[in-house]
Amino acid sequence: MSSGPERRRATLSDVAAAAGVSKATVSKALNGRDDVSADTRERILAAVAEIGYRPTTSLAPVTSRRAVAVVFDIPASPYILGVLQGTIDAATAEQVDLLVRLAPERASRTQRTVAREWVADQRAAGVVGIIGLTLTAPDGLIRAASDADLPFVMVDPVDTRHRHMVSVGSSNWAGARTATEHLIGLGHRRIGWIGGPEASDAARDRLYGYQAALDAAGLTVDPALVRSDQFAVAPGTRHAHELLTLDEPPTAIMGGDDEIAVGVLAAAHALGVRVPEQLSVTGFDDTPQAAWTTPPLTTVHQHLEEMGRMAVQTVLAMADGGRPASRHVELATSLTVRASTGPAPA
């Protein structure tokens, strides 16, 4: 028995008719020519998505090898480098190319035309999946990738409300709670917190873990000791200086990541505060620099390279038609105790 006629494959002429332009204009728009207005390009891309047009030439991969794109905002971070190492290892093992991309400007990546053109560029380069690495405001790119049938996996999501996002991260809440309990066990009662941006899921979970440990120990969370800023050395130094010059300074300060903690150590050194005799300091990530600080840094270890490997494996499985068992993969953390923490001063 016949199952009925197969659905006809959409053509360039179909796109032109749907968008109300010529085939030549469609070709120019899809090939990134700059002699097509933004409105026209937007109309053409909308028509491509609506009728399910799949180019057979200009946008097809130019190589038989598959590629994965890793996109982020700022590469100069030990954390980023750690995760990237894992993506490189996994891409090599899977025999796919790894393309490293900087994201479009934050102000423009939310525009549908910009997001769709960026995603089309990735597909033209043979990309079968995209990994966003702590990428801010990624929702426009995620939607554009979904429209183009390109899987998108986020590592440590930031500032996103996309309901169907697939992500890879660590047990940030449990890690921060364990570090806080370590300090409480050393007798510390005034414990400061300098965390990452409030829009970061990881930063928020770490703050909640810190608060949960204090609550469980019957200790009041002092708002004056809690700060949120960027994951960077300079904010750690600035906020630590403010905390350490309070009338009643904390005896311990927790950094939301290792870079913040390095800034705390710098502020303590500048103020003549001895670590760990007068101040205990912890970080989060266990990047290589944590073992090089003076004194070496107690920090929460998360498997950065494994996060990168997991992201590549997940996005490739999705590209092959698989569905992840969970939309959020969470890897375990552990505490690495070094010389930056000690008993609370009497």
Image (cartoon, rainbow, N blue to C red):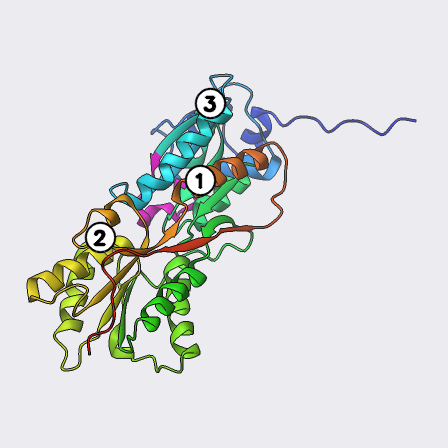
> Would you say residue 111 sits in the magenta stretch?
yes
Amino acid identity at mark 2: Pro
Tell me which residue sits at (45%, 28%) in the image.
91
Q: Position of residue 183 (x, y in %)?
A: 31, 69
Q: Mark on residue 21?
A: none
Q: Which sits in the foreground, 332 or 117?
A: 332
Q: Callout 2: helix, strand or loop?
A: loop
Q: Position of residue 244 (x, y in %)?
A: 15, 72
Tell me which residue sits at (16%, 53%) in the image.
294
Q: Which sits in the foreground, 324 or 145?
A: 324
**Residue projecting furthest to the right:** 1
Label 3 near label 1: C-beta < 8 Å? no
Residue 84: quadrant of the picture:
top left
Residue underneath mark 3: 24
Pick whichever of labels 3 and 2 is earlier in the sequence: 3
Tell me which residue sits at (80%, 27%) in the image.
5
Q: Mark on residue 131?
A: 1
